[in-house]
Each structure stands twice: as structure tokens, then as C-alpha cells.
Amino acid sequence: MLLGTNLGDKKKNLVTAKEFIKAEIGKILQESNILENKAEDFTSNNLFLNQKIEILTQLNPFELLFTIKGIENKIGRVYSTPLQNEIHTDRLIDIDILNFNKISINCKSLTIPHKQIYTREFVKSLFFY
């Protein structure tokens, strides 16, 4: 999973997300370094903190997605309209499923593996210890 935040107390947002993940999704097996980086694919003056985590869960990919969206909502994520010609906005928390075992899913609500694995340089710079 990929955690990202560029609003509010960013370190606290990551900690809070991981607490919810442990309580509602499953065990966190590994945590990567935390990387500070500029926003990609949209205009923002706020730097991001990003981190990858590996989890163990009994949820299927669609249950996982549903639970993630609930966690984002509990933390306070608001989906706002992006600027013209942009697809993203600032956010308190963003939680993405990067991989799920070795399965592939490509539907309207969920794509696994997540395209960011291949397109975002910062994702490639996050390593598990």
C-alpha cells in the first residue's frame, strides 16, 4: 500500500492511517522510509510525505478498497474538484493499493497493480528495511 499526505500535520496523518489500518485491515509487516516530495500531476505548494507499507489481511481486494475509503473518510479526506486539466488535488490522506499478492485486476473501481508503481519516481524511491 502507498500512503500519501500533503495537508495538515503530515507525520500525524501517516501515523493515524497506520493505526486505522492495523485496527481495521490487518497486520503491518513492513514499513518503508518516508519520502518528502513535490506533487505530481497537479499544482500544489504543499510537499507530500509518502510511505509504502506491506500488510497481511484477510480481506479480498474489493473489501480492502472499501475499508481504505472508510479510513480516508475518518481521517478527514475531502474529494474536491481539481483545477482544469488536472486530475488530483491536495489531500489529508491518500491510501492506494499498489499490489495484492500476485493478482491483476483492471476494472472501473480498482486497478492492481497500481499504475503509480511504474509512473511515479517517488514510489520507486521507497524501500522496505
Image (cartoon, rainbow, N blue to C red):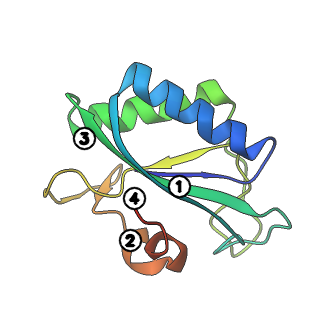
x, y percent for residue 42: 71, 71
Q: Residue furthest left?
A: 102
* Amino acid at pointer 2: Ile
Answer left or right for 119 relative to 57. Answer: right
Q: CA distance from mark 1 to mark 3?
A: 20 Å
Work out whether mark 1 precedes mark 3 in sequence or the reverse, and give the earlier one: 1
Residue at image coords 67%, 44%? 79
Answer few, some or many: residues within 10 Å of disc 2's Cα (few below 14, many 20 plus, some between 14 and 19): some
Q: Which image quarter holds the C terminus?
A: bottom left
* Amino acid at pointer 1: Gln
x, y percent for residue 21: 44, 30
Labels 2, 3: front one: 2
Q: What label sits on residue 51 in the rendered view? A: 1
The residue beneath circle 3 is 61
The residue beneath circle 4 is 129
Q: CA distance from mark 2 to mark 4?
A: 18 Å
Q: CA distance from mark 2 to mark 3?
A: 17 Å
Work out whether mark 1 precedes mark 2 in sequence or the reverse, and give the earlier one: 1
Answer few, some or many: residues within 10 Å of disc 1's Cα (few below 14, many 20 plus, some between 14 and 19): many
* Amino acid at pointer 3: Pro
The residue beneath circle 2 is 117
Work out whether mark 4 precedes mark 3 in sequence or the reverse, and give the earlier one: 3
Q: Is residue 93 above or below residue 47?
A: above
Q: CA distance from mark 4 to mark 3?
A: 25 Å
Residue 42 vs residue 56, the one in the foreground: 56
Q: CA distance from mark 4 to mark 1?
A: 12 Å
SS assignment at label 4: loop
Work out whether mark 4 precedes mark 1 in sequence or the reverse, and give the earlier one: 1
Residue at image coords 19%, 28%? 58
